[in-house]
């Protein structure tokens, strides 16, 4: 299933699911008002949607959807750096890590599908990074790798938009990775049962103005989804709705010669088999 958050005609947040290329308003059928609430309610409600599938009537056309991120308020969003060997090699760090490189990403730093990314006035080094986001469905601490996928509700797409000169001002990446409205998340949460285990073996592409700049397969991740979930859970309990942004492959803009950075008017797309396309335009900060 492709679950989503969207804004209804009344201006309120609604929970939806895509069926027959349109959207079913699940909130109108008595389900919670968001994916966040659905995940906190447990697997039973997700199973109920699947059991109710034949009776669901899609009422909102895709063209009329006002998208919201598929998770609105995660208690934690953890991003993974240098998780593809080729990307590590093109970075200033060169060597592939032997332990996951983790940093945080604030919800204020991302927008939804079809919403503009904002290039901040502080920099012209606005880079793209196409990634898969892992969304936790079942809470847990000290999760074993062999049990980790039982805790995953599903997957989404993420553009880990980065302000490179700020990212490389220090050894900590927080500033360059958390500028307001520089990343994007969506369009939907695809339940884990609709994809290969661990979202492995999926082709990932990032396109800028139609040109493919990243093209890789998730099987090439250094640290796979079970390892990322288990590693994060060693330090803190993962909660329903928490997000792990699993890393980007080679082909980012700063590593190209000449460098390619996003500018006003650009259209950037992240596409992964089974997950759809996350599309955003770029605007300059007012």
Image: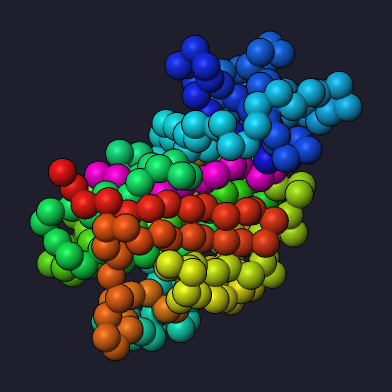
- Asked whether 21 falls inside the magenta stretch, the response is no
* Image quadrant in which the N terminus is located: top right
Residue 211 appearing in the image: yes
Question: In terms of depth relative to the viewer, which is nearer, 145 or 95?
Answer: 95
**Looking at the image, residue 26 lies above or below residue 231:** above
Left or right: residue 186 versus residue 102 is: right
Question: In terms of depth relative to the viewer, which is nearer, 103 or 23?
Answer: 23
Q: Residue 112: percent from the left, percent from the top?
A: 44, 41
The quadrant holding residue 115 is: top left
* Residue ID at (69%, 56%): 274
- Asked whether 187 falls inside the magenta stretch, the response is yes
**Looking at the image, residue 181 lies above or below residue 26:** below
* Residue ID at (57%, 76%): 216
Left or right: residue 91 versus residue 76 is: left
The total of numbered circles placed on residues is: 0
Left or right: residue 102 versus residue 247 is: left
Q: Residue 161: percent from the left, percent from the top?
A: 34, 58
Question: In terms of depth relative to the viewer, which is nearer, 101 or 107?
Answer: 107
Q: Which residues are magenta?
A: 180-191
Q: Residue 269: percent from the left, percent from the top?
A: 48, 60
Residue 162 appearing in the image: no
* Image quadrant in which the C terminus is located: top left
Q: How is the image coloured?
A: rainbow
Q: Residue 119: percent from the left, percent from the top?
A: 23, 54
What's the magenta bit mostly, secondary-structure-wise?
strand
The quadrant holding residue 258 is: bottom left
* Residue ID at (42%, 52%): 280
Question: In terms of depth relative to the viewer, which is nearer, 45 or 250?
Answer: 250
């Amino acid at each position: 299933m492709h679950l989503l958050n969207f804004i209804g005609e009344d201006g309120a947040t609604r929970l939806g699911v895509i069926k027959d290329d349109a959207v079913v308003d699940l909130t109108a059928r008595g389900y919670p008002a968001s994916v966040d609430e659905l995940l906190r309610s447990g697997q039973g409600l997700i199973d109920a949607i699947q059991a109710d599938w034949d009776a669901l009537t899609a009422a909102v056309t895709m063209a009329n959807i006002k998208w919201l991120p598929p998770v609105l308020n995660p208690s934690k969003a953890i991003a993974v750096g240098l998780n593809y060997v080729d990307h590590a090699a093109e970075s200033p760090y060169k060597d592939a890590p032997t332990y996951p490189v983790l940093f945080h990403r604030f919800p204020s730093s991302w927008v939804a599908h079809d919403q503009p990314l904002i290039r901040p006035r502080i920099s012209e080094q606005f880079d793209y990074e196409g990634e898969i986001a892992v969304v936790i469905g079942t809470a847990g601490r000290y999760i074993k790798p062999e049990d980790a996928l039982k805790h995953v509700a599903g997957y989404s797409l993420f553009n880990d938009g980065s302000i490179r000169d700020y990212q490389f001002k220090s050894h900590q990446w927080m500033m360059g990775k958390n500028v307001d409205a520089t990343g994007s998340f969506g369009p939907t949460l695809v339940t884990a049962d609709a994809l290969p285990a661990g979202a492995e073996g999926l082709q990932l592409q990032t396109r800028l103005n139609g040109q493919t700049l990243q093209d890789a397969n998730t099987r090439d991740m250094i640290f796979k989804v079970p390892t990322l979930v288990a590693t994060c859970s060693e330090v803190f309990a993962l909660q329903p709705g928490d997000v792990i942004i699993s890393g980007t492959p080679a082909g980012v803009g700063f590593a190209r010669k000449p460098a390619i950075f996003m500018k006003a008017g650009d259209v950037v797309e992240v596409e992964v088999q089974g997950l759809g396309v996350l599309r955003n335009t770029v605007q300059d900060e007012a």
